[in-house]
Amino acid sequence: KEKFNGIVYENLNNIANQHFPLCMLEIYDNFKQIHTMKHWGRLQFGMFLKGVGMDIKDTIRFFSNELKKSAQGEKKVKEYQYYIEHMYGKQGKKTDYTPWSCQKVAGKNIPTGNEVYGCPFKFYSDNALKQTLEKKKGLSAEDIEEILADKKTDYTRGCKKLFEKTHPGAIPNKGLGRHPNSYFSSSYWASQKRKTIDRQTD
């Protein structure tokens, strides 16, 4: 497994805004807003966090602290803790589950009600995607039009184009467009490389 330095509860917000693919950022932001996460979002997001190397204790802390802000907080903390321990292979069959691929994320039914999961490039209307990209990524109208044009051909191409626009000059790993964790990995290492270059030029 890849090792990403210092992904802990305290800096998760910063890490999410910098490096999460749009599908995971949408679940994360919605959870921070409504303090609850339904079944599919929980599976998609929990296993993604596991895949980026977040420790089980920090994952439980993150979920618990958000859930406590909701009406049924304390009750939900226990329920979610079991889910998280199960995902990390500590409960139930003790299976070492792997994070969902893009194909699995995009293959779910379109969410209804206040559920948030799946692939924005596959599930969102052009208008909803445009608003999301403006708000969360601060992209220009021109960049957004390019992303929308690419996602019409194939939803994974829209995601790849977003990476290209938000990481100019970065070389992504081959899994980009096939796995959300590859998007994270590509973004994380591009940023580490940039920091190294900045230090060398100072």
Image: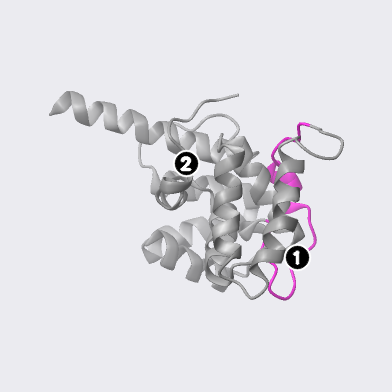
Task: Give me the residue at 58% from left, 71% from top.
Answer: 34
Element class at badge 1:
loop
Q: Is residue 55 magenta?
A: no
Q: Position of residue 30 (x, y in %)?
A: 57, 66
Is 34 drawn above or below residue 42 in the view shown? below
Task: Specify the amino acid type for callout 1.
Answer: Ile
Task: Specify the amino acid type for callout 2.
Answer: Val
Quadrant assignment for the N terminus: top right
Q: Position of residue 19 (x, y in %)?
A: 46, 45
Q: Position of residue 190 (x, y in %)?
A: 39, 33
What's drawn in magenta, residue-wise? 96-118
Q: Which residue is mark 1?
A: 110
Task: Give me the residue at 61% from left, 58% from top.
Answer: 121
Q: Which residue is mark 2?
A: 8
Task: Give me the residue at 47% from left, 63% from top.
Answer: 133
Q: Is residue 112 magenta?
A: yes
Specify which label sits upstream in the sequence, 2 or 1: 2
